[in-house]
Each structure stands twice: as structure tokens, then as C-alpha cells.
Amino acid sequence: MVNDSIPQIAARCHQETDPIHLLCYFAPEVEQELTSTGLEPGHMAYFAGRAAALGRASSAAVAAMLYNFNPALVARHLPRAWDLASPERVIEARLSAVDRALRRILGDEAVGGPEVAEAAALARAAAEACSPEGRPLYAAHAQLPWPREPHLVLWHAITLLREHRGDGHITALVGHGVGAIAALVTDTATGRSLFGAQQMREHRDWSEQEWDAEVSALTEAGLLDSSGRLTETGSRLRSRIEDATDAAAAPPYRSLGADRAERLIALCKPLRDAVVASGDLPRADAAAQPARG
């Protein structure tokens, strides 16, 4: 297998491992643990959990790094969250929640099994090969101590790889001139997003007027058709962004090597399937709806 295949391997590895990471947002244990620290449920728990590795970060800094949330929404919860629970306490609670969720979904036998330990070692090797330059969320999480138990090592490594990829994705969006709302509109228009257009708009706290104005602008630019779906030009733009994201995410997998990266994918697939089957993650049934104008 030649190195030219590594960006595609990076994309496949993300697809197979991301549901494992997503437990830290959607598993019921997460809200239980985070609210037990004093945080409010919902967006505050999400923003604090995602940003705690940054320390007592400002809302402006967090909104810039997360990119597509309405900054006013972030400002309603940060930095107020840090007066309710310290970042250090939030980090502990998040890891405890993931521990509980993985044990519930996979079972103690699988959690302590050789496959999880092997996957953890491979994922950690890849994560430790990531470069922090231009990757603020990755760099912050990379400074956290590694957990001891293999299933938590695996989750932490996947999280590092995910934030590393996400930082690179934002760079690709900025480089292609795709702003925050446009990124959401074109993503949902692909039909592959975890959320549909209305869900995405509401969760990111953009008004109907703001969303519809962006849809109109993208339609006028020839990226969306009159039904709110991507045109050929729009599809090419999204493909260029994803290709740039895959290329930027490739170095840790190139360091790991194609064969070991493929082994990581194979080891994580049954874990991913178990997480998806648990019902903890949102259903993507509404994802194919067009962005309405």
C-alpha cells in the first residue's frame, strides 16, 4: 500500500472511530456527570466539556475554535461556566462519564480485552505523532495526562485525532472562503450530516433569517439549487474541502503506517457498531432534508 492512500485511510479511520468519541456529547452519563459538577445541562455542559482543556477560556476564543456556533450562544455560557465548575473538575467528570458509558455499552469483558488494548496502543501511537502547530483544540487536549485504562486511552487518543482533524477542517473552510453558517448549510445539503438543516440551525443557535440569508447567498453564488441542494459547483467545493481535510489529517496515519492504520480500523469497527447500536447517538434520519430557503 502506497502513501498516496493515507489521506483516504485517515478519512476511513475518522468514520470508524468518531462515534466512539461522540459518546462524550450524547451518552446520558455525560450530562449526569457534568451537571453534578454544578454546570447547567445542555449547551453549557457541551461547551464546558469541549473547552475545559483550554483552561478558563473566553467565549470569544471558544467560539472561534468551534467555528460554526453562534458566538452569542457561547457567550451565554462561557466564562460563566467556570464560576460553577473548574476546568479541572469538568475534565475529570467527562472522563468518568466516558468510562461509565463504554463499560455499559461494551461490557467489562470487552473493555478489558486484548482487542481494546491493541486498539488503544495503535491509536495512541497515531495521536502522539500529531503536530500541534495551528491546532489549538488538539494542542490543548494533548497536554492532558493520558488515562491508565486501555479503553480510556483509546477514547482519549481518538479524541486527540478528532480534534486534530477538526482544527484542520476549519483551516480548510477558512481557506476556501466558507464561513460559519455557509459551512453548516453546505454540510447539511450533502445529506451526510448527523443533523438535518433545521436541527443544525437550532443547535448552533442561528435565526431563520440568518440561515435563509445564507441559503439565498449560496444559491445566488451557484452552490445551491432552487430546492436547497448542492449544485455540481457546490459538490465540487465540498469535495475540495474534504480532500484538504483528509490531507491535513494524514500525517499521524502516515507515521503509524498503512498496515497498522488498517488494523486500527478493523479493531474499532465492532466498537463503533456497538456504540451506534446503543441508541445514544442522534439518528441521522433527517439529515437528507435540503437547506430550505
Image (spheres, helix red, strand yellow):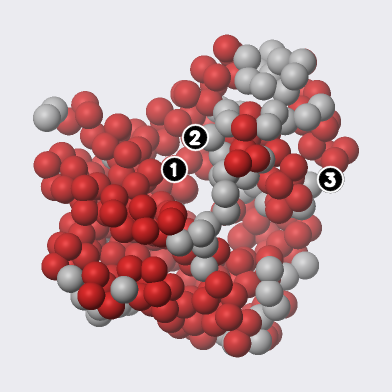
Neighbor class of circle 2 (other Cα within 10 Å; few <14, some 14-19, many 20+) is many
Front disc: 3 or 2: 3
The quadrant in which residue 124 appears is bottom left
Instruction: Label 1: state its secondary structure.
Output: helix
Per the image, the residue denoted by label 1 is 168
Instruction: Tell me how far mark 1 sits from mark 3, CA to CA.
Output: 27 Å
Quadrant of the image containing the N terminus: top left
- Looking at the image, which is closer to me, 132 or 233? 233
At x 12%, y 42%, the residue is: 259
Q: Is residue 165 left or right of residue 57?
A: left
- Looking at the image, which is closer to me, 60 or 20? 20
- Looking at the image, which is closer to me, 32 or 182? 32
Per the image, the residue denoted by label 3 is 207
Q: Position of residue 176 (x, y in %)?
A: 55, 27
Neighbor class of circle 3 (other Cα within 10 Å; few <14, some 14-19, many 20+) is few
Per the image, the residue denoted by label 2 is 172
- Looking at the image, which is closer to me, 90 or 80? 90
Neighbor class of circle 1 (other Cα within 10 Å; few <14, some 14-19, many 20+) is many
Residue 17 is at least partly visible in this image: yes
At x 52%, y 62%, the residue is: 280
Q: Earlier in the sequence, mark 1 or mark 3?
A: 1
